[in-house]
């Protein structure tokens, strides 16, 4: 793929075995970053420069009024030694849906895809070789006009960072149902990725952690009855052997992993129900032995099985997943496609 990215290489790489093997998710950054600026109504040539601080005036609109959106995707090694990104065009499309909602200009797909491809190629040594290892790619796109007026900026910056990562969660996740705070509401920004959504969710996750859970199970903002997402992931249940997930009704982020999981389940001929799932229903079905699996799905974790769910003064605990569990089989299938062990029938991999 051709690219018009100007590259300035670092003179001293920070790459180390320790960084690759032990880095906690998103805490160690690779040697380079991509920067592109939007000024005077157009995108300037993108640049790759050594990772480091960026000058920031005190009054960019992004900082004061939150005109900032971001994405998250991964590049990884395949078994034949090549490097691939997983469905990057989907992240580009979602970044632009987020941008449109916050009145930000579209990021050209060529800039996003070529720029990231060039960045990953340059820092390819940072992709861990261990199983489940990947280079997490974080595009962040923000308003840089210096102004305290509440208005869309005229100038913007796209920055792309990468981090070596291992598997996100070790083991099952435990969640508590959140009844006080809401993540999203109809007409809001729950179906896109502005930074503010995540700031708004921090108090709920901190309180959940104080209570011994990793994160929350979000309910809808109107009735506080229907399950929407879990932490920063989409949620799936297996009920009577069918896979059930809440529908994309405008308050749920359309996850790339969610879509991939649904596609694979259809390929496997499984029954899928995209329908509202009430929290009471989950507890009733569990008691009747009809709810057998639940998992959070997203780029960082891929498919993370759910262990305990706390709700008011009750708690349920799902049985540990075996290799015969449905969602575990989908996880393994996804992993086989990612690594090239299984044919990529849907052309999800973009090889670099
Ligand atoms: C709120 C939320 N839901 C779901 C997801 C999963 O989306 P994806 O599979 O595209 O990573 C994410 C991660 O981006 C998220 O932040």
Image (cartoon, rainbow, N blue to C red):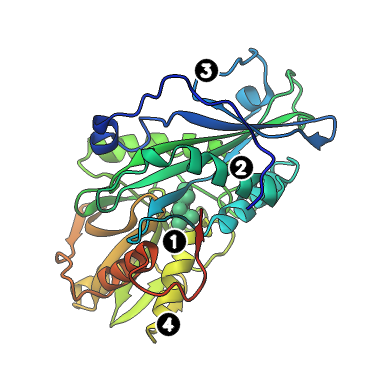
Residue at the spot of label 4: 267
Most distant residue in the right direction: 40
Kindly identify the residue that appears in the image at 29 percent across and 29 percent down: 16
Disc 3: CA contacts within 10 A as few (<14), some (14-19) or many (>=20):
few
- Label 1: few (<14), some (14–19) or many (≥20) C-alpha neighbours in 10 Å: many
Q: Are marks 4 and 3 in contact (CB under 8 Å)?
A: no
Quadrant position of residue 213? top left
**In the rendered image, which residue does mark 3 sit on?**
53
- If you read the primary sequence from the N terminus, does the residue marked by circle 4 or circle 3 appear first? 3
Q: Residue at x 36, y 73 (%)?
A: 342
The residue positioned 55% from the left and 47% from the top of the image is 117
Marked residue nearer the N-terminal end (1 or 3): 3
Disc with the residue nearer the chain's start (4 vs 1) = 1
The mark nearer the N terminus, 2 or 1, is 2
Inter-mark Cα distance, 1 to 3? 32 Å
- Along the horizontal axis of the image, is 153 left or right of 290? right
Q: Quadrant of residue 260?
A: bottom left
**What residue would you read off at disc 2?**
115
Assign a secondary structure to mark 3: loop
**Vertical relation: 42 (above or below) 109:** above
Q: Which residue is mark 1?
A: 257
Secondary structure category for the residue under label 2 = helix
Q: Is residue 101 visible?
A: no
Pointer 4 or 2: first along the chain: 2
Q: Secondary structure at mark 1?
A: helix
Query: How busy is the neighbourhood of tag 4: few (under 14 within 10 Å), some, or many (20 plus)?
Result: few
């Amino acid at each position: 793929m051709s690219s018009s990215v100007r590259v300035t290489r670092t003179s001293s790489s920070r790459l180390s075995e320790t960084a690759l093997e032990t880095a906690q998710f998103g805490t160690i950054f690779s040697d380079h970053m991509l920067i592109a600026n939007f000024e005077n109504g157009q995108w300037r040539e993108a640049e790759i420069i050594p990772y480091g601080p960026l000058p920031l005036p005190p009054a960019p609109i992004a900082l004061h009024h939150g005109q900032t959106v971001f994405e998250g995707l991964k590049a990884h090694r395949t078994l034949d030694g090549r490097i691939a990104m997983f469905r990057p065009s989907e992240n580009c499309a979602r970044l632009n849906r987020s941008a449109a909602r916050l009145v930000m200009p579209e990021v050209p797909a060529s800039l996003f895809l070529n720029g990231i491809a060039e960045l990953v190629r340059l820092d390819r040594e940072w992709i861990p070789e261990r199983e489940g290892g990947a280079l997490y790619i974080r595009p962040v796109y923000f308003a840089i006009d210096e102004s305290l007026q509440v208005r869309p900026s005229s100038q913007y910056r796209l920055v792309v960072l990468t981090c070596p990562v291992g598997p996100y969660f070790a083991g099952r996740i435990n969640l508590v149902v959140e009844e006080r705070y809401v993540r999203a509401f109809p007409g809001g920004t729950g179906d896109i990725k502005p930074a503010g959504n995540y700031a708004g969710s921090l108090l709920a996750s901190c309180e959940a952690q104080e209570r011994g859970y990793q994160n929350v199970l979000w309910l809808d903002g109107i009735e506080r009855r229907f399950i929407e997402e879990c932490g920063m992931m989409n949620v799936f249940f297996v009920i009577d052997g069918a896979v059930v997930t809440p529908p994309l009704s405008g308050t749920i982020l359309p996850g790339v992993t969610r879509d991939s999981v649904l596609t694979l389940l259809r390929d496997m001929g499984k029954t899928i129900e995209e329908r509202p799932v009430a929290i009471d229903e989950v507890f009733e079905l569990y008691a009747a032995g009809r709810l057998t699996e639940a998992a959070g799905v997203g780029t960082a974790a891929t498919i993370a099985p759910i262990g305990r769910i706390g709700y008011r003064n009750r708690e349920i605990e799902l049985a540990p997943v075996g290799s015969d569990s449905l969602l575990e089989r989908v996880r393994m299938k996804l992993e086989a496609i990612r690594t090239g062990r299984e044919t990529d029938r849907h052309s999800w991999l973009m090889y670099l």
